[in-house]
Image (cartoon, rainbow, N blue to C red):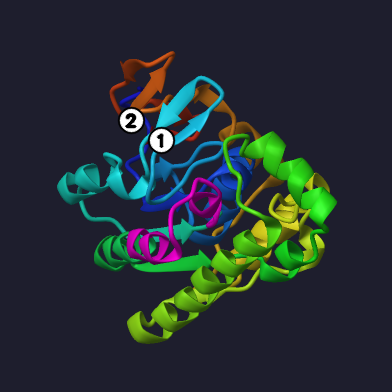
Amino acid sequence: MDRYHDAPRNRFILLGASNLTLSLRLAIDLMQQRFGGPSEIFTALGHGRAYGVCSQMLLRGLPGIADCGLWRQLDLAEKYPTYALLTDIGNDILYGLPPEQVLRALEWCIGQLQKHATHFVVTNLPMTSIESLSERRYIFFRNIFYPSCRLSRNETISRARVVHHGLMGMAMQRRFKLHEQKPDWLGLDGIHVNYWQRKAFYQDLLDQFHVPGDKPEAVEGKRKFLLTWQQRPEFAYKTVFGRTVYCQQPSGQLADGSQVCKY
């Protein structure tokens, strides 16, 4: 890592699964346009990632977000203005975790965000698009993304509704911002944001942060350079072919000096 870059101005905590993984640099770029940079960035994400249970995608395994090393590292980190996103909820259901356990894992993560983040936003399950899935489409995408899952469409929707309503009650009780996603942004599978709508999706998500003050100046050409990878982040812990692989954090760096931890 380059020690001569400016010190971080803030910290971002980004929690999610496939959507966030596919749009990580975009999400960081939009957050820095709003909150400034360079930033210290903590991520827990990955295709198929879950909050309360270990996930397996092809030959790669990852711990549940609630059990990953991000939280221990945050306890040791210096204090910065911190902005967080918790998104891509729902994979736990297709891995067979009961709604009550899903909500317990989410509530634990939200409690940690309330401890560490100045401002954060949570996205709820996209129930409108999930409920619009036909039986044929549901089975098709379930077999592709969750080949070990045997939950029926009706059972999956029933469990998703419990988590959706549980998060609404949790948001009222714990007083955090819960954002409902627009179904028009989501593709045929009901859960992944359309490629050409990713920027609008994350801009709308960041509009939920009610933070006073002027946005930092952003020059388009300069930002494109600053948001290129000098070093791509690697997972702090994963399993591959059943073999444990560790990587010291932070493991990634952007051209503006922002350092990225990936758990």
Q: Nearer the viewer, residue 182 or 221?
A: 182
Image-based side of 46 in relation to 115, left or right: right
Q: Nearer the viewer, residue 44 or 170?
A: 170
Residue ID for mark 1: 260
SS under mark 1: strand
The location of residue 72, given as percent across then percent down, is 20, 44
Identify the residue at image location x=50%, y=22%: 230
Which picture quadrant has residue 239?
top left
Classify the position of the C terminus by image quarter.
Answer: top left
Image-based side of 5 in relation to 20, left or right: left
Does residue 92 belong to the magenta stretch? yes
Identify the residue at image location x=48%, y=31%: 56
Disc 1 and disc 2 in contact, CB within 8 angstroms: yes
Q: CA distance from mark 1 to mark 2?
A: 5 Å
Classify the position of the N terminus by image quarter.
Answer: top left
Task: Identify the magenta region.
Answer: 89-105
SS under mark 2: loop
Image-based side of 222 in relation to 106, left or right: right
Q: Is residue 203 above or below residue 240?
A: below
Identified by mark 2, the residue type is Pro
The location of residue 35, given as percent across then percent down, is 49, 59
Q: Is residue 186 above or below residue 24?
A: below
Q: Is residue 1 visible?
A: yes
The location of residue 73, given as percent across then percent down, is 22, 42
